Image (cartoon, helix red, strand yellow):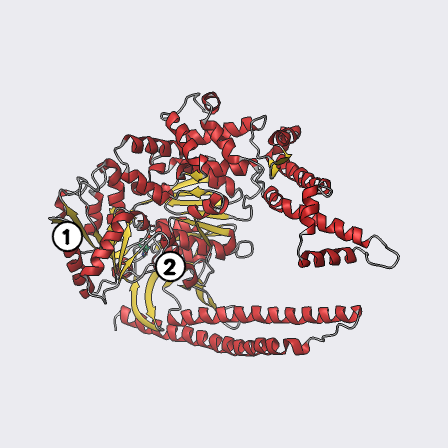
C-alpha cells in the first residue's frame, strides 16, 4: 500500500469522526431550537393572557405595566437565544458539508508533533478541550497560509511561536465526502487554486478561505497599521482580501468590534450586491456598505440637485474635445486636488475670524433675525471654542429668539384673525392644554381668556414651525454662499491658495458656480468640497466616531479631496484602502496617479503600502493580452497565474448592425458551451440602452438579457449589458467588448478604461469594433 492511499484511508476515518461530532452537536442544537421555538410561540400567544390588565387605579396601572415589561423581556430573551441557536444550526450545516480544508502538522521547538485541522469555523468536542477543527482565523492557522514545510513560526499574543512545519495537506470535502487530498510543498498548493479558478463565475463573489495566498494573508491579518494601502493588479484579489480581512477582524476583536462599526465604500450599487454574500457564507454578519454617492445624497441631496459621478463622466465624454468640455475637465481635476483641499482648509481658518455667511430668519416679509445679527452673535464667541461651539450656541439663541417672537406676535392682527379661523380640532387641543395646566376649575374665571391665548400661540407657533425645524438642522449657516465666495473673490482665493496662485480656468469655474449653484444645482466636483465646508461650519457634529474600520475599494477612483474628507468623517477609524492605479478611470482622480491622496493621509510610521502582483481572475492568455493595453511601465508588475485558456479575439465589423449580429451569434455559442455569466460591456450608458435593445431583438426570447443600470443592485445570471463604470470590480465568465473602435477608445485617457473593461473576463475575452480598432489594443489579438 503506498503512502498516499494509507493517508487517504486514515483521513477518511478521521473525517467520519469529525462528522459524527458535528451531527451530535447538531442533534443537540436542533432539540434546543425546537424547545425554544415552542417557548417563543407559546409566549407570543399567551403574552396578553399572562399580563394582568387592570387600569382601575394608579397602583394597578403600575403593576400592569411591570407585568407587560416582564413578559416582553422574557420574550426578547427567548427570541435572542432562539436566534443564536438557529445561527448555530446554520453553521453546523455548513460544517457538515465541509468541516475543514487543510491539515498541518507542527512541532513546537522541543515539543511534540501536533496535528491541526483548519476550517471555516472551529469545532470543539463536548469535553470543551478537544479541538477537532481550528478556525482559519486562529493564530496557529496562519502557519498554513504563510509557510511551506520546514522551519516556521506564528504570532502569539506575547511573541512568536517557533517550530517546524512537518506536513501541509489540503482537502476538498463536499457534502461530507472527501473528494480530493493533496500534500503540498508550495505555500498553498496550486492544484486546488487551479481548480477553484477554473470554475465558472457566479453572480455573487465567493469566499477564498481555502486558498488565501501569502501576500493576501498579510493584508488580512495586519493589525499594526492604521492605514493600509494596497495597490493590486486587476484580479489580484483585493476585494476578496478585504472581505476576508473583515471576517478576520470580527473574529480577532469579537469582544470590542461589531459589524456595524465597519463600513465599506463600494464603487456602485451593482458591486454592493455582488459582494454581499461573502461574509454570511463565512458565518459573519455583513458590515455596513455605502457608495460615496449615498453619503453625498444623505448630506446635501435633499436640498440640492447634485450631479452624480456617472452623469459627470458621461457629460465629459460627450463634450470631449470642445472648449467647454476642456474647461470642465480642468475644473474637475482641480476641485479634486490636494491643492484645492489645502486652499479650502486655509479658507476655513480665515473663516474663524470673519466671513461665514448666514441666512436670515424671515416670516413673510418680516425679518425675525437678520444675517448680520447672526454673524455678530457667532463671532462674539471666541475662535478657540471652534465652529462647533459657536454654531450650537447660535442655534440655541435662535431658537429662543423664535420663541420670543411667537410671544411678541400674540396681539398682532394677523394672529388674532387666524385664531378666529382655526378648526375644531385645534380648539380641542387648546382645551386639553389649558386643562392640563390646571384650568377650568371653579375658582378660575379666565378660562376663555386662556383658551384664546393658547389658540393664538398655536397659530404663531405653526407659522414659525418650518423655521424652528430649519434652525435645528443648522440651516441658518449658508454653506453654499460661504463656499461660493471662494470663486467670487480673486484676492480671497489667492490669499488662501498654498502657492498664492489662481488655478488655470478659475474664471470659468467662477462663472460656472454662478450658473449652477444659482439654481440650486451642484456639479459633482463641487459636492465634496461643499460638504466639507458645510460640516466644518457645523463643527463636524455628524462625524461618525463609532466607526472603527473603514474600507475603501476601488480607491483609485477617489479624488485626494474625497480621501481627506473621509479621513475627517471617520476620525477614529483605521483605514484599509484598496485599488489599482491602472484602473483609474475617472477624471477626478487621474491627477493624483490614483493613490497619493491616500498614502499621505496618516504618518508614515502607521502607514503600510502593499502590492499584489499576481492576477488570479483571468486566464494567462487574457492577462498577457490585457497587459499589452497598458503603457509598458504600468504593466511591469502584473504577473499572470498560470491557467490555460483561449487567446482573446479582436473582431472587426463593417458597421453597428453587423456588430450586433456577431455579438448575438457569439452569445448563443457561449451559452451553448455552458458559460453562465456573459458581460456585454459598452463605454457609456447611452450605448448600453441601444446595445441591449438590439440584442433583445436578435436573440431568442428565452435568452436572458439584462440591462444593468446605476440603480440595479443585482447582477443576474445570463447576459448582462452594462456600461464600463458599472463593471468596476465585478467579473464575468465571458466579456464581449461592445465597439472598441478608435472612435470610442482613441484617446490616452481611454486606455485605462479599456483595460478595466477587458480585465473583467475570467475565461473568454472577445473584443468587437467597427471602423478602426482602438490604438490601445495590442497587435497579437486576432
Ligand atoms: N487566493 C485566492 N484564491 C482563490 N481565488 C482567488 C484568490 N484571490 C483572488 N481570487 C479570485 O480572483 C478573482 C478576482 O478577485 P478580486 O475581485 O478580489 O480582485 P480585485 O483585485 O479586487 O480585482 P479588480 O481590481 O480587477 O476588481 C475573484 O474571482 C477571486 O475569487
Q: Residue at x 75, y 51 (%)?
A: 452
Image height of 364 relative to 429, above or below: above
Query: Which element type, helix, strand or loop, lies under badge 1?
Result: helix
Q: Residue at x 67, y 52 (%)?
A: 421
Total numbered badges shown on the rendered structure: 2
Give the quarter of the figure containing the N terminus. Answer: bottom left
Q: Quadrant of residue 391?
A: top right
Name the mark nearer the viewer: 2 or 1. 1
| Residue occupying the far right of the picture | 443
Q: Position of residue 759 (x, y in %)?
A: 25, 49
- Residue under label 2: 209
Q: Position of residue 86 (x, y in %)?
A: 50, 71
For the residues labelled 2 and 1, say whether their Cβ atoms are less than 8 Å apart.
Answer: no
| Residue 760 seen in render | no
Q: Position of residue 469 (x, y in %)?
A: 60, 46
At label 1, counting other C-alpha atoms closer than 10 Å, the crowd grade (few under 14, some 14-19, many 20 or more) is few
Q: Which dot marks residue 452?
A: none
Mark 2 to mark 1 CA distance (whole Å): 46 Å
At label 2, counting other C-alpha atoms closer than 10 Å, the crowd grade (few under 14, some 14-19, many 20 or more) is some
| Residue 304 seen in render | yes
Asked if the beta carbon under badge 1 is closer than 8 A to the nearest atom of ligand 1, the reply is no
The tag earlier along the polypeptide, 2 or 1, is 2
Of 60 and 563, which appears nearest the observer? 60
Q: Is residue 565 left or right of residue 623?
A: right
Q: Which dot marks residue 657?
A: 1
Query: Which element type, helix, strand or loop, lies under badge 2?
Result: helix
Image height of 118 relative to 743, above or below: below
Q: Position of residue 528 (x, y in %)?
A: 45, 38
Amino acid at each position: 500500500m503506498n503512502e498516499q492511499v494509507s493517508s487517504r484511508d486514515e483521513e477518511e476515518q478521521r473525517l467520519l469522526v469529525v462528522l459524527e461530532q458535528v451531527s451530535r452537536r447538531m442533534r443537540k442544537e436542533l432539540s434546543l431550537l425546537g424547545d425554544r421555538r415552542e417557548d417563543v410561540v407559546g409566549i407570543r400567544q399567551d403574552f396578553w393572557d399572562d399580563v394582568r390588565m387592570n387600569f382601575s387605579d394608579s397602583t394597578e396601572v403600575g403593576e400592569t405595566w411591570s407585568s407587560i415589561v416582564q413578559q416582553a423581556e422574557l420574550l426578547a430573551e427567548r427570541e435572542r437565544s432562539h436566534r443564536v441557536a438557529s445561527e448555530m444550526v446554520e453553521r453546523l450545516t455548513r460544517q457538515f458539508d465541509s468541516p475543514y480544508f487543510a491539515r498541518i502538522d507542527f512541532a513546537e521547538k522541543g515539543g511534540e508533533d501536533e496535528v491541526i485541522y483548519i476550517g471555516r469555523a472551529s469545532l470543539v468536542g463536548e469535553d470543551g478541550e478537544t479541538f477537532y477543527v481550528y478556525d482559519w482565523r486562529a493564530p496557529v492557522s496562519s502557519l498554513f497560509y504563510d509557510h511551506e514545510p520546514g522551519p516556521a513560526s506564528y504570532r502569539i499574543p506575547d511573541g512568536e511561536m517557533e517550530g517546524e512545519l512537518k506536513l501541509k495537506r489540503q482537502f476538498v470535502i463536499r457534502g461530507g465526502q472527501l473528494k480530493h487530498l493533496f500534500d503540498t510543498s508550495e505555500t498553498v498548493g496550486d492544484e486546488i487554486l487551479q481548480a477553484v479558478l477554473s470554475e465558472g463565475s457566479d453572480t455573487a463573489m465567493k469566499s477564498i478561505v481555502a486558498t488565501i495566498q501569502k501576500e493576501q494573508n498579510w493584508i488580512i491579518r495586519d493589525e499594526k497599521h492604521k492605514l493600509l494601502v494596497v495597490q493590486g493588479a486587476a484580479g489580484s484579489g483585493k476585494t476578496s482580501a478585504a472581505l476576508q480581512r473583515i471576517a478576520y477582524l470580527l473574529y480577532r476583536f469579537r469582544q470590542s468590534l461589531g459589524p456595524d462599526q465597519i463600513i465599506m465604500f463600494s464603487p456602485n450599487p451593482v458591486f454592493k450586491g455582488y459582494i454581499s454574500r461573502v461574509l454570511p457564507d463565512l458565518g459573519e454578519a455583513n458590515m455596513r456598505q455605502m457608495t460615496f454617492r449615498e453619503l453625498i445624497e444623505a448630506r446635501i441631496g435633499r436640498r440640492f440637485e447634485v450631479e452624480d459621478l456617472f452623469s459627470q463622466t458621461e457629460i465629459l465624454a460627450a463634450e470631449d474635445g470642445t472648449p467647454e468640455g476642456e474647461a470642465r475637465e480642468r475644473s474637475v481635476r482641480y476641485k479634486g486636488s490636494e491643492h484645492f483641499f489645502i486652499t479650502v482648509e486655509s479658507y476655513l481658518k480665515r473663516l474663524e475670524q470673519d466671513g461665514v455667511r448666514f441666512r436670515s430668519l424671515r416670516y413673510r416679509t418680516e425679518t425675525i433675525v437678520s444675517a448680520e445679527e447672526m454673524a455678530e452673535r457667532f463671532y462674539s464667541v471666541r475662535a478657540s471654542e471652534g465652529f462647533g461651539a459657536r454654531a450650537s450656541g447660535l442655534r440655541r439663541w435662535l431658537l429662543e429668539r423664535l420663541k420670543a417672537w411667537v410671544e411678541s406676535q400674540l396681539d398682532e392682527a394677523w394672529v388674532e384673525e387666524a385664531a378666529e379661523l382655526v378648526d375644531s380640532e385645534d380648539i380641542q387641543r387648546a382645551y386639553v392644554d389649558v386643562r392640563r395646566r390646571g384650568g377650568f376649575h371653579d375658582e378660575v374665571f379666565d378660562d376663555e381668556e386662556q383658551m384664546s391665548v393658547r389658540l393664538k400661540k398655536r397659530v404663531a407657533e405653526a407659522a414659525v414651525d418650518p423655521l424652528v425645524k430649519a434652525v435645528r438642522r443648522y440651516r441658518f449657516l449658508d454653506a453654499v454662499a460661504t463656499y461660493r465666495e471662494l470663486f467670487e473673490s480673486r484676492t480671497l482665493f489667492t490669499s488662501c491658495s498654498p502657492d498664492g496662485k489662481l488655478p488655470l480656468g478659475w474664471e470659468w469655474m467662477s462663472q460656472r458656480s454662478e450658473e449652477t449653484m444659482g439654481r440650486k444645482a451642484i456639479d459633482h466636483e463641487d459636492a465634496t468640497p461643499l460638504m466639507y465646508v458645510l460640516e466644518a461650519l457645523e463643527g463636524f457634529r455628524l462625524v461618525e466616531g463609532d466607526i472603527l474600520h473603514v474600507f475603501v475599494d476601488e480607491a483609485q477612483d477617489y479624488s485626494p479631496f474625497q480621501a481627506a474628507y473621509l479621513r475627517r468623517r471617520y476620525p477614529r477609524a483605521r483605514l484599509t484602502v484598496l485599488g489599482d492605479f491602472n484602473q483609474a478611470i475617472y477624471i477626478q482622480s487621474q491627477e493624483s496617479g490614483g493613490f497619493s491622496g491616500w498614502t499621505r493621509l496618516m504618518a508614515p510610521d502607521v502607514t503600510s503600502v502593499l502590492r499584489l502582483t499576481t492576477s488570479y481572475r483571468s486566464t494567462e492568455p487574457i492577462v498577457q493580452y490585457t497587459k499589452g493595453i497598458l503603457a509598458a511601465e504600468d504593466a511591469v508588475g502584473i504577473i499572470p497565474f498560470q491557467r490555460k485558456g483561449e487567446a482573446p479575439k479582436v473582431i472587426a465589423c463593417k458597421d453597428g448592425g453587423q456588430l450586433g449580429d456577431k455579438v448575438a451569434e457569439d452569445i448563443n455559442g457561449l451559452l451553448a458551451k455552458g458559460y453562465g455569466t456573459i458581460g456585454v460591456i459598452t463605454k457609456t450608458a447611452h450605448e448600453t440602452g441601444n446595445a441591449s435593445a438590439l440584442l433583445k431583438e436578435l436573440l431568442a426570447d428565452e435568452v436572458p438579457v439584462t440591462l444593468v443600470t446605476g440603480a440595479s443592485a443585482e447582477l443576474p445570471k445570463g447576459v448582462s449589458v452594462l456600461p464600463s463604470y458599472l463593471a468596476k470590480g465585478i467579473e464575468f465568465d465571458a466579456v464581449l467588448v461592445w465597439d472598441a473602435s478608435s472612435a470610442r477608445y482613441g484617446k490616452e485617457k481611454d486606455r485605462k478604461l479599456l483595460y478595466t473593461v477587458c480585465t473583467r473576463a475570467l475565461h473568454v475575452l472577445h473584443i468587437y469594433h467597427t471602423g478602426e480598432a482602438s490604438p490601445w489594443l495590442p497587435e497579437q489579438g486576432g
